[in-house]
């Protein structure tokens, strides 16, 4: 008689095992991904499986109802106390008795995959640096004098094959009471980074810890700090939250903050203090929102531009303000939360900071590369992450190039006469009728659209407060489409255009979108100054992209990916009418959502991705826009709408 055949789904892994083999043991021998925190003691329930019954033609197996052993005491006790879902068994208790097909549900897989919403979704595979282990530690014995930590280490070695552990003093101070409270049964959180050879004990709980483990993925921008609180077992985002970067009071953009550090002794330290305080506040708020204890946050990943990177780490950014823009380090960093004074989270939490690409292309661009993987692309992809600076990546399988370009804050609605952040009351999209020259628009926070296509007639609106980045881009592009503005960006007069919407403003003209000034509301126009600000921003973006294309020796790209919160809202057509991005078929322009934030989540959930991005960053060719004379040439030529010389054949279609 051959031993029973065991087939695991969805992996399809199979093998013969002697009767009486626990399912968890069979899974381990076959390398099937089946979770366990308690090591098969029947208490953590992470190992749940579903046995199938009947004929499995695909696998050539007929499964009898008694293919697995009956419930034993441990399983029955678990079910009585905690309840198993119908049909589920504990993999560590159920034993193989006959041919069987066993399904491992997603929640029992350690390396489960997290589904992403964005179009260019890279799946996140769970493989976090911090994990939970339940152990039974030998009690102390007068005749064999060893320390509690040494016995804990031995238990982890015997029960989990963890060769070595390390614990710091703050952990040691709680070790003895916790061990005794748990009657020498404890759960430990062990962290092992991709460069560590020894696992660190991040936390210890009496008995089985069931409160979960969490991490923060933080996108530290010059204007806002955004965090995603992520469950380190499932990858699920439990809460997302953001706050303004309080460094704004030291300077709106990066260069003014560097100047502040240069001109004020101790200014860098003030800014470091401010941002660390903000991160602590954010961590407290987000934990509260998700209703978890902030001490369960045991890991944090940061992505940020080089100046933010230095200020977070407490490094004076002055070298980043002048050529040759030397970084203190471009390598990734793994640190203790205490080193960054992150007191709101677990004191032994580990922090990973992604590597910077160059002195002006930061860890945020590295995170975009991790999320969008241009180095794996078959076709030539241009990825732009638009913020106060644009991070630009161009590449395919053979080579990836990167630069950053100083677009300024116009795309975010700043420096625009009626500009505002994308918040309720902001006009976010606009259409100008080419015949009547009348505007219709869409306002954030207003859902009562009068039109089928979701655009309002101007007369029907109240509660409008301003125009945000995507709105101003569409407005300028629509002015061009409707023939109200020429290629150089000049708005015509009422006499030239035949519409009263074109109103004089100083010595130039403006286009009136909405006027509620009679009722004390805003008067929203697109002024000549607004158009100038958008032209400067779009020229910088386009020139950066063109510089990379020159370097790569191409005059067109195959596809364009717009990343960032802004990229998610901007219309591809309007971006191209403006000449923000090079000409490609419109269907080849996609939005990746917050790719930098996603990159941070990937590095948080998957420890191998940290090594991967370090390698990727070393292979990226860095292009410096500030010292490249060609950049200026491209910039000037890109001032026209869409462009002075470069062709835009797709627009003609
Ligand atoms: Fe913990 Fe089975 S492994 S209950």
Image (cartoon, grey):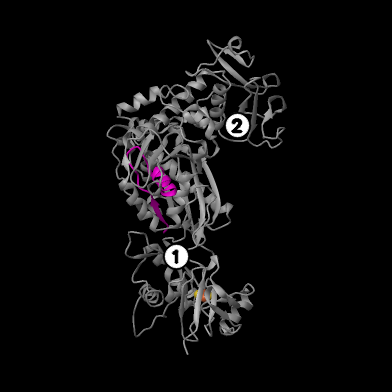
* Residue 518 screen position, x and y as percent: 70, 18
The relative height of residue 586 versus residue 631 in the rendered view (above or below) is below
Residue nearest the observer in this picture, 141 or 30: 30
Secondary structure at numbered mark 1: strand
Residue to which mark 2 is pinned: 429
| Count of picture labels | 2
* Residue 453 screen position, x and y as percent: 67, 34
Label placed on residue 131: 1
Whether residue 454 is visible here, answered yes or no, is yes
224 relative to 543 in the view: left or right:
right
Q: Please check the rendered image and state whether residue 363 is part of the magenta-colored stretch, yes or no.
A: yes
Q: Please check the rendered image and state whether residue 420 is part of the magenta-colored stretch, yes or no.
A: no
The residue that appears at 42% across and 30% down in the rendered structure is 542
* Residue 253 screen position, x and y as percent: 43, 32
Instruction: Give the extent of the magenta segment.
Output: 348-373
Whether residue 335 is visible here, answered yes or no, is no
């Amino acid at each position: 008689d051959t031993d029973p055949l065991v087939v695991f789904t969805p992996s399809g892994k199979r093998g013969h095992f002697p009767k009486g083999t626990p399912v968890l043991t069979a899974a381990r021998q076959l390398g099937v991904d089946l979770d366990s925190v308690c090591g098969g003691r029947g208490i953590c329930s992470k190992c749940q499986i579903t046995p199938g019954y009947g004929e499995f033609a695909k696998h050539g197996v007929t499964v009898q109802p008694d293919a697995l052993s009956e419930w034993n005491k441990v399983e029955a006790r678990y079910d009585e106390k905690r309840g198993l879902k119908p049909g589920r068994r504990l993999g560590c208790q159920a034993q193989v008795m006959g041919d069987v097909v066993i399904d491992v549900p997603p929640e029992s897989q350690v390396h489960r995959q997290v589904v992403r919403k964005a179009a260019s979704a890279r799946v996140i595979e769970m493989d976090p640096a911090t994990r939970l282990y339940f152990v039974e530690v030998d009690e102390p014995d007068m005749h064999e004098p060893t320390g509690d930590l040494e016995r804990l280490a031995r238990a982890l070695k015997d029960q989990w094959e963890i060769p070595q552990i390390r614990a710091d003093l703050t952990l040691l101070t709680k070790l003895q009471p916790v061990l005794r409270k748990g009657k020498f049964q404890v759960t430990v959180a062990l962290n092992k980074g991709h460069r560590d050879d020894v696992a660190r004990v991040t936390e210890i709980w009496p008995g089985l810890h069931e409160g979960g483990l969490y991490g923060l993925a933080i996108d530290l921008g010059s204007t806002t700090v955004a965090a995603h609180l992520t469950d380190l077992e499932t990858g699920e985002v439990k809460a997302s939250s953001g706050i303004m970067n309080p460094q704004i009071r030291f300077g709106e953009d990066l260069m003014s903050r560097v100047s502040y550090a240069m001109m004020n002794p101790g200014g860098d330290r003030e800014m470091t203090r401010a941002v660390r305080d903000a991160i602590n506040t954010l961590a407290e708020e987000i934990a509260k929102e998700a209703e978890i204890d902030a001490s369960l946050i045991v890991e944090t990943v940061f992505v940020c531009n080089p100046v933010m990177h230095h200020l977070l780490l407490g490094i004076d950014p002055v070298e980043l303000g002048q050529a040759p823009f030397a970084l203190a380090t471009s390598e990734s960093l793994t640190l203790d939360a205490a080193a960054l004074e992150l007191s709101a989270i677990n004191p032994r939490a580990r922090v990973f900071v992604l590597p910077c690409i160059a002195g002006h292309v930061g860890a945020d661009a590295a995170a975009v590369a991790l999320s969008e993987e241009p180095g794996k692309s078959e076709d030539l992809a241009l990825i732009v992450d638009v913020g106060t600076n644009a991070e630009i990546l161009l590449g395919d399988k053979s080579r990836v190039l990167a630069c950053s370009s100083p677009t300024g804050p116009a795309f975010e609605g700043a420096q625009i006469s009626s500009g505002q952040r994308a918040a309720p009351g902001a006009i976010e999209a606009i259409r100008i009728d080419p015949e009547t020259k009348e505007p219709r628009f869409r306002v954030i926070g207003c859902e009562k659209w009068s039109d089928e296509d979701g655009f309002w007639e101007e007369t029907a609106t109240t509660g409008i407060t301003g125009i945000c980045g995507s709105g101003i881009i569409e407005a300028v592009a629509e002015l061009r489409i409707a023939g109200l503005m020429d290629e150089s960006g000049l708005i015509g007069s009422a006499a030239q255009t035949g519409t009263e919407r074109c109103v004089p403003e100083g010595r130039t003209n403006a286009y009136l979108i909405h006027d509620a000034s009679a009722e004390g509301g805003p008067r929203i126009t697109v002024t000549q100054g607004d158009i100038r600000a958008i032209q400067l921003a779009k020229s910088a973006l386009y020139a950066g992209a063109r510089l990379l294309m020159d370097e790569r020796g191409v005059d067109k790209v195959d596809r364009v990916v717009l990343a960032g919160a802004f990229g998610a809202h901007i219309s591809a057509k309007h971006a191209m009418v403006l000449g923000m991005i090079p000409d490609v078929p419109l269907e080849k322009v996609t939005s990746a959502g917050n790719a930098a934030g996603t990159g941070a989540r990937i590095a948080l959930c998957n420890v191998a991705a940290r090594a991967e991005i370090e390698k990727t960053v070393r292979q990226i060719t860095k292009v410096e826009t500030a010292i490249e004379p060609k950049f200026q040439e491209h910039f000037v030529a890109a001032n026209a709408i869409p462009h002075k010389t470069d062709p835009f054949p797709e627009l003609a279609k």
